[in-house]
Image (spheres, rainbow, N blue to C red):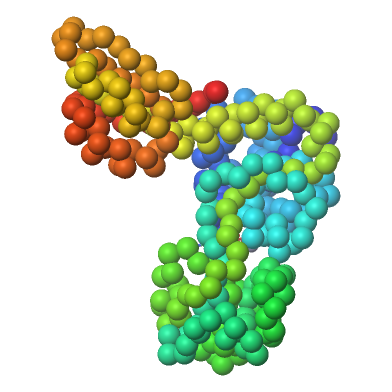
């Protein structure tokens, strides 16, 4: 056993690339992992274990891995005793109830007495209980969406992101059962490697923060400074610079990425020109 932090990542699936991309953004050099079970990061004391996502909570709970990246849906379904340290902003999806296009499901109460097929019986059971509903759950290990056409279930409860799979199977989504995204989990064991873990978490948080922010630059007429400052949802007070043209100022500010298009029109009306919006690589506050 080396003293490296052990991180479990999905071996091959929807979370794999995004997990590795996040680590690479954190400065980790990870060699081609294709068929390997364990890869040691070249420039950081960490081993990456590639596992099926369903196994990750248990491996982390048992301390085989110190930390792991996995969907909240899997953690909840497995009832794992792990701590969630950070939401990672990718792998977003939701578990939804869906029913055949030629049927109706007007209210949640219509679920009573129905048969629902799912790969997430625990999440579904808790949802039904919470809403005082009584339905029969059929647990399947995959291809849940074909259950209604096979006649073995009235409804399904499955992961939906775009809804394309549902459409192909002539199903309509209805009520949302659970929202999920990828998170970082840890075992209590990870404590002995606190220093490495804190280093990693610090880097991840700065990358996530940077991803949700943009650097805004523009030129403005001097007399509209107050108005421009009012419009910009800046994290800190914006930087104001003098330009060679004494009627103009340059204003720089860090803004939340999703607000740019909301304020763009207002900035233009207030006389802003030469507007640039740049990505931020890293952000330490
Ligand atoms: P494994 O072989 O590792 O068991 P899997 O088939 O169970 O893989 P994937 O389909 O790769 O799992 O999905 C992994 C996780 O990605 C899901 O548990 C969920 O948290 C998340 N996810 C995000 N969007 C979707 C989606 N559209 N469909 C399924 N999962 C999604
Ligand atoms: Zn899985």
The residue depicted at 17 percent of the width and 8 percent of the height is 246
Picture layout, residue 256 above or below residue 237: below
- Considering every residue shown, the one lying at the far bottom of the view is 151
Picture layout, residue 262 above or below residue 119: above
Residue 122 position, x and y percent, is 72, 70
Asked if residue 224 lies left or right of residue 35, the reply is left
Residue 106 position, x and y percent, is 49, 83
Q: Quadrant of residue 201?
A: top right
The residue depicted at 70 percent of the width and 78 percent of the height is 132
Q: Quadrant of residue 68?
A: top right
Specify the quadrant that holds the N terminus: top right
Specify the quadrant that holds the C terminus: top right
The residue depicted at 40 percent of the width and 38 percent of the height is 257
The residue depicted at 65 percent of the width and 90 percent of the height is 113
Name the residue nearer the viewer: 215 or 52: 215
Visible in this render: residue 143?
no
Q: Quadrant of ligand 2?
A: bottom right
Visible in this render: residue 265?
yes
Residue 226 position, x and y percent, is 30, 22
Name the residue nearer the viewer: 255 or 136: 255
Residue 84 position, x and y percent, is 70, 46
Q: Quadrant of residue 128?
A: bottom right
């Amino acid at each position: 056993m080396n003293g490296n932090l052990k991180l479990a990542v999905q071996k091959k699936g929807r979370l794999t690339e995004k997990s590795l991309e996040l680590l690479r953004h954190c400065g980790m050099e990870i060699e081609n992992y294709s068929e390997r079970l364990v890869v040691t990061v070249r420039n950081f004391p960490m081993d990456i274990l590639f596992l099926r996502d369903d196994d990750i909570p248990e491996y982390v709970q048992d301390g085989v891995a110190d930390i792991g990246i996995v969907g909240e849906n899997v953690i909840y379904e497995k009832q794992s005793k792990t701590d969630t340290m950070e939401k990672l902003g990718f792998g977003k999806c939701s578990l939804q109830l869906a029913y055949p296009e030629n049927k109706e499901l007007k209210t949640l109460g219509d679920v009573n007495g129905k048969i629902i097929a799912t790969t997430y019986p625990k999440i579904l059971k808790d949802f039904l209980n919470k809403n005082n509903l009584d339905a029969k759950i059929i647990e399947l290990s995959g291809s849940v969406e074909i259950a209604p056409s096979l006649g073995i279930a009235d409804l399904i409860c499955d992961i939906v992101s775009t809804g394309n799979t549902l459409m192909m199977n002539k199903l309509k989504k209805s009520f949302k059962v659970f929202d999920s995204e990828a998170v970082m989990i840890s075992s209590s064991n990870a404590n002995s490697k606190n220093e490495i873990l804190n280093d990693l978490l610090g880097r991840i948080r700065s990358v996530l923060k940077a991803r949700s922010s943009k650097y805004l630059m523009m030129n403005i007429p001097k007399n509209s400074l107050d108005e421009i400052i009012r419009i910009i949802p800046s994290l800190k007070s914006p930087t104001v610079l003098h330009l060679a043209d004494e009627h103009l100022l340059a204003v720089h500010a860090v803004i939340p990425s999703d607000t740019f298009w909301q304020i763009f029109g207002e900035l233009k009306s207030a006389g802003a020109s030469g507007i640039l919006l740049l990505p931020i690589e890293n952000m330490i506050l």
